[in-house]
Every structure is written in structure tokens, then in C-alpha cells.
Image (tube, rainbow, N blue to C red):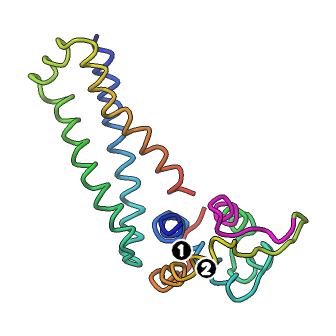
Amino acid sequence: MDGVLWYVLASSRGGPTRVRIVRALDQRPRNANELAEELDLDYTTIRHHLDVLGDNNVVKQSADEYGAVYLFTDQTKANWTTVEEILDTVEADAEEEE
Amino acid sequence: MAVWLDVARAAAGVNVLLLVALGSVWLRNYRRHGAAHTLGLLVFGGFLLVENLLWLYYYVLHPDFVGWFVNAGTDVQVGMTFLCGLELVALVFLARITWQ
């Protein structure tokens, strides 16, 4: 899991944006719309990054319905010290995105 | 069979392009936040880049090597081509997840 977290948050193209999402979700659970507003990013961009985070088992949706909030998986919680370390390392200044 | 030579050349060439693209993402991210994990990928990618440039030099610009390759048996040609070909498969996979 450590390697996956480092790759997804620090070494891939969308890493910095995903760090911002993780920070926002750490404050409180939010849905894609709230994240887009909070981070001032396009809804589709947010969805893309949430999909990547979901595929890598970092976050999960609280329910299947539209507008459900995103939560960290048990796996992410178990590796939270690594996540903290990555957040501290990656000072995510907003930038680029597809 | 010159076809294997062409395949090997193409694979080495695409490997170089992929490594430059991957390296640019890793270098940018490393300069921004200096994560050791990213540095590891950068070092790894750097050596693979040197390796593939060397392959390209042999395959394209080195007449003696090309002569040896063309006259070698099919087993040798296929094996040599696989060295760059398998690396290409691995790099394409890495590029896919890096670009997400």
C-alpha cells in the first residue's frame, strides 16, 4: 500500500491534485460536487481523480446513490502515517490538469 | 530476416520516447516536492534511458552490430528483439498509470 500511495499522490501526473482532494476529505467527508466547489476544479476533473483514488483503493463512496460522500478505505486508515508523510512532503500548490 | 531488426529498432525508439515523457513527469514532481519515491523512479528511468539510447546506437548506427544481427539465427534475433520489446510493454503500462 505504501508504494501505491506514494505513486498515486506524489509520482504521477495528477498527484498534487489528488493530495488536495485527500486533504479536503480529511477535514470532512464530501461528495464530488462539494469537492469541486471547495477546490475550485471542474466536476469531471474531480470525478476522474476520485475514480483513480477509488481504483487504487484509497477512497470509497459511502453509498451507491448520486451525491454520496467519499470516505477513506480501511486500508488507507491503516496506513495513515504514510498518508501524513506524503501530505507533508507534497505541498500541493494547485496547478495543471486535464 | 530484417523484420526483427526493424521491430527492435522501433521498440528501442518508442522506449526512449516513453522514458522521456515519464521522466518529465517524475522530474517535475520531484522538483516540486522532492519525494524519495519519485527520485527512485527518476533514477530508474534515467538508467533505462541510457540503456535504450545505447540499443538505438547499436541497432541504427553501428554497421558491425547490424551485420552480426542480420546474420545471426532467428532465435538470436527474436531474443534480442524481446529485450527491448518486453521493456516496451512494461513502460506502456507504467505510462498508463502515470498519466491518470
Task: Say which mark, if any, is on residue A20.
Answer: 2
Tell me the SS state at disc 1.
helix
Determine the chain carrying the residue at label 1: A
Q: Residue at x 28, y 16 (%)?
A: B75
Name the residue nearer the viewer: B16 or A96: B16
In the image, farthest residue toward the left: B64
Residue A28 point in image, percent of width and height: 75, 87
In the image, farthest residue toward the bottom: A27
Q: Are marks 1 and 2 on the same chain?
A: yes
- Residue bearing the label numbered 1: A16
Q: Is residue A56 left or right of residue A84?
A: right
Instruction: Specify the quadrant that holds the C terminus of chain B.
Output: bottom right
The region drawn magenta spans A49-63
Q: Residue at x 26, y 19 (%)?
A: B77
Q: Amino acid at mark 1?
A: Pro
Q: Is residue A27 magenta?
A: no
Residue A59 point in image, percent of width and height: 69, 70
Above or below, A36 relative to B80: below
Tell me the SS state at disc 2.
helix
User: Do the numbered discs 1 and 2 sit on residues whose CB atoms are within 8 Å?
Assistant: yes
C-alpha gap between disc 1 and disc 2? 7 Å
> How dense is the environment of label 2, judged by Cα within 10 Å: few (below 14), some, or many (20 and up)?
many
Residue A96, picture quadrant: bottom right
Q: Is residue B7 left or right of residue A46?
A: left
Q: Residue at x 24, y 53 (%)?
A: B47
Residue B83 point in image, percent of width and height: 30, 33
Q: Amino acid at mark 2?
A: Arg
Above or below, B22 relative to A19: above
Name the residue nearer the viewer: A85 or B17: A85
Determine the chain carrying the residue at label 2: A
Above or below, B84 relative to A86: above
